[in-house]
Amino acid sequence: MAGGDGETNASTNNNGVEAATEELAGEEEEKGSGVRFPLARIKRIMKADPELGLASQDAVFLVAKATELFVESLALEAYHYTSQSKKKTVSRRDVDHCIDAIEALAFLDGAMD
């Protein structure tokens, strides 16, 4: 039944972005850890904060997963601006439009300068 639900969702989407994302997510879960970022690098970045004493593996995993979801969300939103412009390549301008349009991303304003 799970396969049928995925096929229904993929066929009802306006574009293939959501379908591709769901397909990749399914492949990720089969691989094991389910994160795309290297956990050792995430842990090293976390330890760079002097206020952090120890970072458990669970904390590192959660930060990696949250980062992955954030980057995926930002990329999808930027892609929407790219597709509205009838382009195929996401540019910095598309990401800037995304940051300006979405209030939750206001903290990124000026981060790409």
Image (spheres, grey):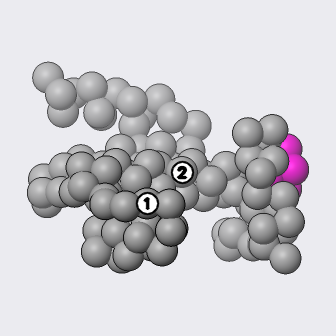
The reply, left or right, for residue 80 in relation to residue 26 is: right
Label 1 SS: loop
The residue sitting at 24% across, 55% down in the picture is 56
Q: Is residue 73 above or below residue 109?
A: above
Point out residue 74 in the picture as x, y percentages from the top left corner: 62, 53
Mark closer to the observer (2, 1):
1
Quarter containing the N terminus: top left
The reply, left or right, for residue 67 in relation to residue 44 is: right
Q: Is residue 20 visible?
A: no
How many angstroms separate mark 2 from mark 1 (CA)? 22 Å
Tag 2: amino acid: Phe
Q: Nearer the viewer, residue 103 or 30?
A: 103
Point out residue 6 in the picture as x, y percentages from the top left corner: 29, 33
Q: Name which of mark 2 and mark 1 comes first in the sequence.
A: 1
Q: Which residue is mark 2?
A: 70
- Residues rendered magenta in the picture: 97-101
Tag 1: amino acid: Leu
Point out residue 67 in the picture as x, y percentages from the top left corner: 47, 56
The residue sitting at 85% across, 66% down in the picture is 110
The residue sitting at 43% across, 60% down in the picture is 52
Quarter containing the C terminus: bottom right
Label 2 SS: helix
Asked if the stretch drawn in magenta spans residue 109, the answer is no
Q: Which residue is mark 1?
A: 52
